[in-house]
Image (tube, rainbow, N blue to C red):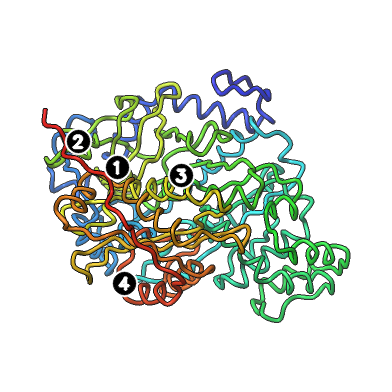
Amino acid sequence: MAVDALCSPLGPPACEKDAKALQFIEEMTRNADTVQENVMAEILGRNAETEYLRQYHLDGATDRESFKSKIPMVTYEDLQPIIQRIANGDRSPILSSHPISEFLTSSGTSAGERKLMPTILEELDRRQLLYSLLMPVMNLYMPGLDKGKGLYFLFVKSETKTPGGLMARPVLTSYYKSDHFKTRAFDPYNVYTSPNEAILCPDSFQSMYSQMLCGLYERKQVLRLGAIFASGLLRTIRFLQLNWRELAHDIRTGTLNSKISDSDIKGCMVRVLRADPDLADFIESECSKDNWERIITRIWPNTKYLEVIVTGAMAQYIPTLDYYSGGLPKVCTMYASSECYFGLNLNPMCKPSEVSYTIMPNMAYFEFLPHDPNSSTGSTSDQLVDLVDVEVGKEYELVITTYAGLCRYRVGDILRVTGFHNSAPQFRFVRRQNVLLSIDSDKTDEAELQSAVENTSRLLNAFNTTVVEYTSYADIKTIPGHYVIYWELLAKDSSYFPTNDVLENCCLAMEESLNSVYRQGRVECNSIGALEIRVVKNGTFEELMDYAISRGASINQYKVPRCVNLTPIMELLDSRVVSSHFSQRLPHWTPERRR
């Protein structure tokens, strides 16, 4: 089967199964508007008698015009009372005519709160469908992936139940525990080194240890290595640094560490364990070296790429990933959230800064709210734009209507249109719609803070030092208040660490990178104090992650919060500070010229 539009210099689809998947992508994207119209009719038709839709008097209408004229745009806060009723046990058709099967919990660090997203059983089929499209696209650009395995560090979190008895868990935990994943058919292009028993173990140490052990045994078969987020992959490297002696001992003796007590893992590892003194010697030789540069390709020499999310806030990990991998390609395959799976990257080998996702029009009904950060007026439903009508170069907030009953729901993601594949738009993820830091009238968001850190970190290049991790805090205990930035640094040569003068210059460089309102507050109004950088001990942010996981965060969905204000977290960070530095000069600012 020829698939002309999804061409690659590497040749045709790898197999007939891939050809069918690629043809499906073509059909969906060529007919995006028709598919969207059908999705809308299906959602409105099946949910016509729900409490939510009846209150807007659609009277059975399933056309887009009626939908747009009567259904308002909403946020999670608008729906929270309804969602709480369902969580408390109300089984009437409130949002969906199909029973709510469980709640999918959003990332604990996204917008600062844990949200419950209702879902229905058939959504698993849609997620599985999108997953099934990823490797056929990847195979166009990277041949021979059926000749080896993938070392993917995947984890579950133990579930909780709502008062009404419904399960509440992260979307990936839901998927990994489903039959779609556990009883998946063998696919030579998608074989993992990690056994299901290791992935499904809720104890993160035992899961990580056994997955790493399997990956080391099959080091020469590993062709791709990954985790969900870039931060998660770096966590596995840190795990190897802390546990390589025990892992090498197990490989040398063919026995399993006594810390592994999970019976399912112990049962499956019997098939994996074998005494291999030569491999143990190799692991000890490589891991005992002070220099861990290129450790990924040293341990797993046939790795072709890393599969991790490095867009949005995860982009800051790219230099550290490059250090440990020797600059291996970093592949972002898909765009998804707890609310809905959205689309996939049709050019997976592109640079991280060029990643764009093609929205698959069959997944939900998509609308887009034009985003103008300078606008002071509120957003209304009549501003929403249909999927095929967005404009290249413009930014939008994503708004979705799902089969599970979310109607015109604001996801909070800001996307920039980069182009089209057939009639389906392609988007670059820009940021979450939120503000991280504010002392006075200043408002600093995640993208701006990240850009400031990236710009400033260039001053560290002369010292072969990178910013491994960071977070921030608006310190209002001082008068005036000031921004505090916590940095964890990675120095290739610990004897050549950045001096106090350099780090003070980093403080000033960060301020120069922030917006004019901030700089005006510093220079003219004196409403903001000098920015402070606090350097913390190595491993501090791993402790922060451990704390979040102990409080219920998902190891798969965890993202370092870019702003912190909880007392236990502040106390942890401040207890690990090794040096503190302030801007010694004012940043540049001049009054803006009026037009």
Please state the horizontal and vertical placement of residue 211, each as a whole percent of the image.
67, 63
Q: Secondary structure at mark 2?
A: helix
Q: Residue at x 58, y 34 (%)?
A: 349
One can see residue 559 in this view: no
- Disc 4 to disc 2, C-alpha distance: 42 Å
Residue receiving disc 1: 401
One can see residue 276 in this view: yes
Q: Secondary structure at mark 3?
A: loop
Which quadrant does the C terminus fall into?
Answer: top left
Q: Residue at x 23, y 43 (%)?
A: 589
Which quadrant does the N terminus fall into?
Answer: top right
Residue type of the residue flagged with mark 1: Thr
User: Residue 198, located in which quarter of the rendered image?
Assistant: bottom right
Residue receiving disc 3: 311
Q: Are marks 2 and 1 in contact (CB under 8 Å)?
A: yes
- Disc 1 to disc 4, C-alpha distance: 34 Å
Q: Are marks 3 and 4 in contact (CB under 8 Å)?
A: no
Residue type of the residue flagged with mark 4: Leu
Residue type of the residue flagged with mark 3: Thr
Residue receiving disc 2: 67
On screen, residue 75 versus residue 185, left or right, reads left
Marks 2 and 1, the one that precedes in the sequence: 2
User: Of 52 and 445, which appears nearest the observer?
Assistant: 445
Marks 1 and 4, the one that precedes in the sequence: 1
- Disc 1 to disc 3, C-alpha distance: 24 Å
Q: Secondary structure at mark 4?
A: loop
Marks 3 and 4, the one that precedes in the sequence: 3
Residue type of the residue flagged with mark 2: Phe
Residue receiving disc 4: 566
Above-or-below relation of 525 to 515? below
User: Of 34 and 349, which appears nearest the observer?
Assistant: 349
